[in-house]
Image (cartoon, rainbow, N blue to C red):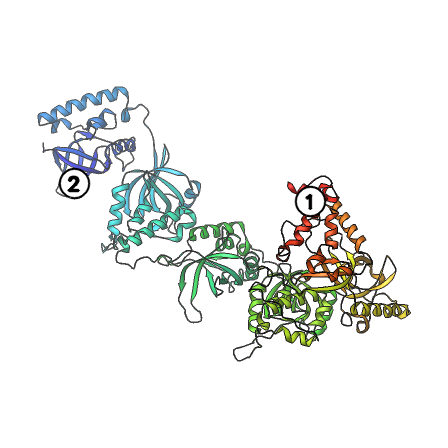
Amino acid sequence: MSAPQEGRVKSVLSGDTVILQNKGKQERTLSLAFINAPRLQQDEPGAFESRDFIRKQCVGKIVHFRVLYNIPQKTGGGSRDYGIVNLANGQTLPDLIVQEGWAKLRDDADRKAESPQASELLERLTALEAHAKADEKGVWASKPSNIQNVRELSDAKAFAEEHKGEPIETVVERVLSGDRLICRLMVNPTYHVTTTVLVAGLRSPTTARTNPSDGSTQAAEPYGNEAQAFVEERLLQRGVQVRLLGVSPNNLLVGSVQHPVGNIGEFLLKEGLARCTDHHSTWLGAEMGKLRQAEREAKEQQRGLFRGAAPLQRSAGSEAEATVTRIFSADTLFIRNKAGAEKRINLSSVRQPKPSDPKQSPFGAEAREFLRKRLIGKHVKIKTDGKRPATEGYDEREMATVTSGNTNVALMLVENGYASVIRHRMDDTDRSPLYDDLLAAEVKAQEEGKGMWNPKPPKQQTFVDHSESLEKAKRQLTLLSKQRKVPAVVDFVKSGSRFTVLVPRENAKLTFVLGGIRAPKSARGPQDQGEPFGQEAHEFANKRCMQRDVEIDVEDTDKQGGFIGQLYVNRENFAKLLVEEGFAQVHAYSAERSGNANELFAAEQRAKEGRKGLWHDWDPSKDAEENGEDYDAAPATNGTNGANGDAGMSKAKMDYRDVTVTYVDPTNARIKLQMLGSGKQNLDSLMKDFANFHISPQNSKPLAQPPKAGDVVSAKFSADNVWYRARVRRNDRENRTSEVVYIDYGNSETQPWSSLRAIDNDRFGVQKLKPQAVDAALSFVQFPTSPEYLSDSCKFLDEVTYDRALVAMVDYNDTRDNLLYVTLIEPAGAEASGSSARLKSVNAEIVSEGLAMVPKKLRPFERAAGDVLGDLKARESEAKNERRGMWEYGDLTED
């Protein structure tokens, strides 16, 4: 009998044999003395249970053992050691296994019991065996268990599909390499499968191998033996759970192997003993992200396979914000950062439908449009993942992850079948951080037949170019001029005021020109010379309009087949924006025809006052000289434009204008003023000629064609049956009526088309005499919001101003809204000073009647008139006490 020794149980071959390892990793086989257990290799009854009983007791644990005797082997010249093993819990083998009935005494056991200790052990084992027989334990059971162990699967794929995703209790029988295990899958208590399983999501280096045909040896790859030893030490004959995912191209099962402390793949990758592989990414789903993180950690720490490699370069900086300015294709965008710099980026790890693939290419335009609708003009977050160096035929490309809100743009495209996922090399780091999610989304999109994975080709939309010739343009004009706010998309910006637009519902492609303005020409090429501010206007239009959803009103065509009209971006007239920035001038004649002359002239005036663009060196005295007026420079305002920083208000000269109120708007109590004097005299003269004009039968014919919004026509006012100049505000084509505004008086009504007449523009048009009704609002007052009290206010205002000559003190001119803020006084009061005159005004009278109040939020010019405000507040207080008008039930504003 040898002296006691110590070792770690590496594995259990069967119920009576273990393999031990000393501290130097040297191995020895030890059989348990005096017993035989069923043979596992022959799948004898009870063999698995016998081996499993010992495996659970001692695999991976430190034990003490002694050799009792040796038996020479028939082959090899060596001998086998037989002995006893003392477990850490104080129990002894072979006593324990005999006691449980999983081993029998050898027939020749008494021959080896030469020492007293051996004889004592044999006697003890004999007694234990007798008890096990009596209790029918283990192999002595009357009905022994029968476990079917399949060593070769006839259809590995079908087996994987049947048990896909199920956690199967498993014993790792052998470790071939870091990523390749021979496992005993315990599908159920009576059915086991022993086969090779590949660890999903990674590839480890191979170990040394011998070619059985010629006996040649293939050396292990670097870190191959280390990877095998790492897994062997942790998994060999351990109980694990295997979750099958599929089969490899070689028909081997692929699954994730879960040890009680975690996924073995993660631990292997953290040590740098394997690399991630993308082949199983779609099977693993979110688990793949954990594996990549483990690999990233090994790279950062330069462990194992990554020792000596260049340190992993982390993306510098955080996400940057930008605006999407153009969609080049489904995987390529143009963005503009906060500094205004524009650059091109590619979405990481995805590719648009391939133009060279006949099945994918028909979806290219649809994919681009899908992205345009969701991103153009939107604020996004950009994070650069890497750069592809310039190659022959390709510039350097920046690969980036783009996020809109909480949505990853590349993932959104792949989920809807409008992009495919690029298969990267294993060492390619320029990939999306959501690469595994992209792969999973692609598989799902393919299964559901979305986008380019749909076997049916998309319906192709073909646009007809109606600007190709003047004849085609005229035909399309008839249709488009009858519609208002037609939805369109700006496909290309040719200059500041010239665009190519697509009208999807008409399948029309148009060259569209902004009406009412003229923008400077931009350079068409490097050798071309543009007009001053032409390039700036072009860039401004590009920034605001390129690929945007817009609305258009078509009014006419030019000689080249271009369509003239108004273009609205976010419901705002783009011509006005262009003029307001100083990048275009108003063309008076066409602006009047379009019906938005006031808006454009007001915008131009703001650009002039702001010295913007074309007006950077504007001299107001020259404008006054050209208009035959005297220029009176505004007083110094300390750089505040006289409006306390309010850019929409510009301080006017203190002037008094003889006026009459022609209309009170019942919706907001604003008024229309008609200036007395030469303008009134000219209007009276025009109206006499206008009446004579309509006496002639040839001028009483209805309009030849339906009117367009903005047209100036002749309309007979229903209250007095007199013909007046009117502008068409909007049309009801179903009822064939128009809402018209009487431009010299300000009131409006709806007239049937049959009651409208054409006018002679040379004699009666707005070029002959500009519209005489001027928009105005009463200063220092705020009208009630209640419809009942507002109606009372408007009636009172109409009564006190009807057919009266008044004087309007112009307090401020709001050039933004083209609105005069006025105080209305009696002509006799105009001789008093400004403050005194305001104390005896219509404004003050309406406050006294309780039909208006002093505004809570005062305008800058109002805050400066303290004496006027004091008087009006006193009047308001008196009206409240007397319960007049809106105060009849008390002060409701206190709530």
Amino acid, disc 2: Asn
Amino acid, disc 1: Ser
Quadrant including the C terminus = top right
Taking depth in this image into account, of 108 and 167 the one nearest to the observer is 167
Residue 359 sits above or below residue 120 on the image: below
- Image coordinates for residue 667, horizontal then vertical, percent: 74, 52
Q: How many marks?
A: 2
- Image coordinates for residue 497, horizontal then vertical, percent: 62, 70
Q: Nearer the viewer, mark 1 or mark 2?
A: 1
Query: Dot 1 corresponds to which residue?
Result: 877
Quadrant including the N terminus = top left
Q: Is residue 36 left or right of residue 771?
A: left
> Badge 2: how crowded within 10 Å, few (<14), some, or many (20+)?
some
> Badge 1: how crowded within 10 Å, few (<14), some, or many (20+)?
some
Q: Is residue 76 left or right of residue 842?
A: left
Q: Quadrant of residue 581 in the image? A: bottom right
Determine whether the residue tagged by mark 1 lies in a helix, strand or loop. helix
> Is residue 812 visible to us here?
yes
| Residue ID at (58%, 56%) | 456
Determine whether the residue tagged by mark 2 lies in a helix, strand or loop. loop
Q: Quadrant of residue 534 in the image? A: bottom right
Taking depth in this image into account, of 600 and 880 the one nearest to the observer is 880
Query: Dot 2 corresponds to which residue?
Result: 22
- Image coordinates for residue 764, horizontal then vertical, percent: 81, 70
> Is residue 472 visible to us here?
no
Taking depth in this image into account, of 572 and 369 the one nearest to the observer is 572
Taking depth in this image into account, of 777 and 566 the one nearest to the observer is 777
Q: Are marks 1 and 2 in contact (CB under 8 Å)?
A: no
